[in-house]
Amino acid sequence: MRVSKLLNKTLKEAPAEAEIPSHSLLIRSGMIRKLSGGIYSYLPLGWRVLQKISNIIREEMNNSGCQELMMPIIQPAELWKESGRWYVYGDELIRFKDRHNRDYCLSPTHEEVITTIVKKETSSYKELPLNLYQIQNKYRDERRPRFGLMRSREFLMKDGYSFDKDNEGLDNSYNDMYSAYSRIFDRCGLSYRAVDADSGAIGGSSSHEFMVLANSGEALIVYCDDCEYASNIESATHKAVTYKMGELQSIEKVATPNVKTIEEVATFLDVKKENLIKTLIYKATYKDNEQLICVLVRGHRDVNEIKLLNQLGALDIALADDEAVKKATGVEPGFLGPINLVNLPLYIDEEVLSVEDGVTGANEKDFHIIHVNGKRDMGQGTVGDYHLISEDDTCPVCGGKIHFARGTEVGQVFKLGTKYSEALDCTYLDENGKAQLMVMGCYGIGVSRTMAASVEQNHDEYGIIWPVAIAPYQVILVPVNMKDDTVVAFAEDLYATLKEKQIDVILDDTTERAGVKFANADLIGYPIRVTIGKKALYESTVDLKVRATGEVMSLGLEEAIGTIESLLKL
Ligand code: ATP
Ligand code: MG
């Protein structure tokens, strides 16, 4: 390729909305352009990067025995009603009607379609296991599209689905995908960590997310210093804390005028925050109705809303506003407590049971109750793990010190089990001719997000530093003066030689000043730059610069070609 022919305009400035380096650099280097909020075009250089990532994914999938196919983006509502997700997917699902007033959606994921295909195209245990994937645009009307390709509304995803006879088969498929994902992200030059994840609304029993550590990441990850434990905070647990036993005393109502918050109560009554019992009212939204529920956690804890949501099986939960709380309980928020609270479904965090001598609101303005005992006084409720862990907790596996870090999820593997095969009646005949449900897994990679994540990890103040495997071109040749015929001839010769050797090379044959060419090459992030200047004529040497290290080598022609080949590991 020649830069003079390339559709590529670099920009000095990024748009104001570009808050993170990958967003800004992908736009400035002319790889992507915004069409509308969260909707981007991939221009030729950006598309080459995406193709290279896609090809790495294809190679690893095909080597793991998976088959590529392509399914429709437009999907009929009936199918989504059959699985039940038409009603629960919410506003993220982009819905529309055709000219006959029939409902459709743009696919955010393909469990429904693939399950229907496999159901119709297979019948016997002999045809299993099957692992099918595609690389295709997905559509999600995200609440907050942002950070360029990181969270967009149209994005490129590889989605794969495995079908097995039983759980043992699923374990094998899952493990194969887990290792393939590790190889893919290694090859894309990402530093990542696979963490335990919540299997959430999509259903299923086990899941890992592949997280790229980045300050701009929207996910919070917990990891242990001393062992392999790593988890999304949403699903993280910790080693049980043993609290000091107090003496069992009778409860007592005490005046706490205008003392409402956890901090205020702790100070006023001179008790530790962990001995307070926080009483929170949430509004849970279900398919057909809404319900207020009450959650109890120890005073120093926050509610893990994902765990609570999963326990409730609700579509969404949010803290109820003060008005709703007052209306439902007759109590001013700040003085709520589980003792003699109006009849709301009660969810008790398991740690609350170990409060020996605690404090709660008295369900009466300006009063609290002291000497509350978690086991004795909480009443009937569903006990479970509903609290978020904190950095003061210790590792659930080894008891070691844990830390929090921010991460971006680039891929996820799920064990779905029979959720979709049951809903859509996807069965096979076993050895005895008996119908059995297929056991499924699903496996996603955000291809466009992986591209952004790679830039997030590989850049400097001058621009992108592409890993060789996914660079739009691996080598750029920069003749410094296009008016000098001998320089041009030299560059053209080298260009032809490298192309003959199947090296992915681009020649900057524009008449820009050398400084501009260098700045563009750095911004776009080609791994190797070869400068052809006067020295090429007098000494027959060129300057080879490695983008990642900044190292510059003055090399003879043959030597330069050899160095390029070894740097690219050809
Ligand atoms: P997130 O929690 O970040 O919203 P998700 O759990 O909804 O992601 P999955 O359904 O697991 O995502 O989709 C598979 C992959 O697709 C994710 O691992 C991620 O890399 C990518 N992805 C998901 N949503 C987006 C988006 N809005 N923009 C770009 N990539 C996305
Ligand atoms: Mg996910």
Image (spheres, rainbow, N blue to C red):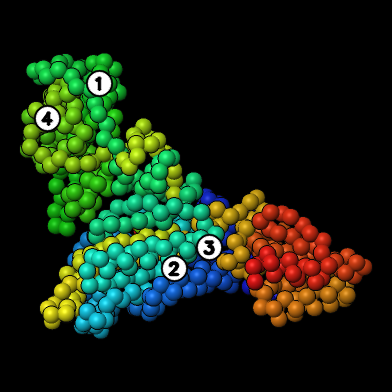
| Residue type of the residue flagged with mark 3 | Cys
Please tell me in which quadrant of the rendered image residue 469 appears.
Answer: bottom right
Task: Classify mark 4: residues with Cα within 10 Å, few (<14), some (14-19) or many (20+).
Answer: few
Q: Secondary structure at mark 3?
A: loop
Which of discs 1 and 4 lies nearer the camera? The answer is: 4
Residue linked to disc 1: 265
Residue for point 40% across, 47% down: 228
Which of discs 3 and 1 lies nearer the camera? The answer is: 3
The dot on residue 375 is: 4
Q: Earlier in the sequence, mark 1 or mark 4?
A: 1
Q: Quadrant of ligand 2?
A: bottom left
Are the residues at dot 4 and dot 2 in contact (C-beta closer than 8 Å)? Answer: no
CA gap between label 2 and label 1 equals 51 Å
Residue linked to disc 2: 156
Q: Secondary structure at mark 1?
A: helix
Give x and y (percent) for residue 273: 27, 24
The dot on residue 188 is: 3
| Residue type of the residue flagged with mark 4 | Lys
Q: Earlier in the sequence, mark 2 or mark 1?
A: 2
Foreground residue among 294 and 375: 375
Foreground residue among 115 and 56: 56
CA gap between label 4 and label 2 equals 51 Å
| Residue type of the residue flagged with mark 1 | Val
Residue 413 vertical position relative to residue 490 in the rendered view, above or below: above
Please tell me in which quadrant of the rendered image residue 357 appears.
Answer: top left
Q: Earlier in the sequence, mark 4 or mark 2?
A: 2
Viewer can see residue 246: yes
Residue for point 11% across, 34% down: 329
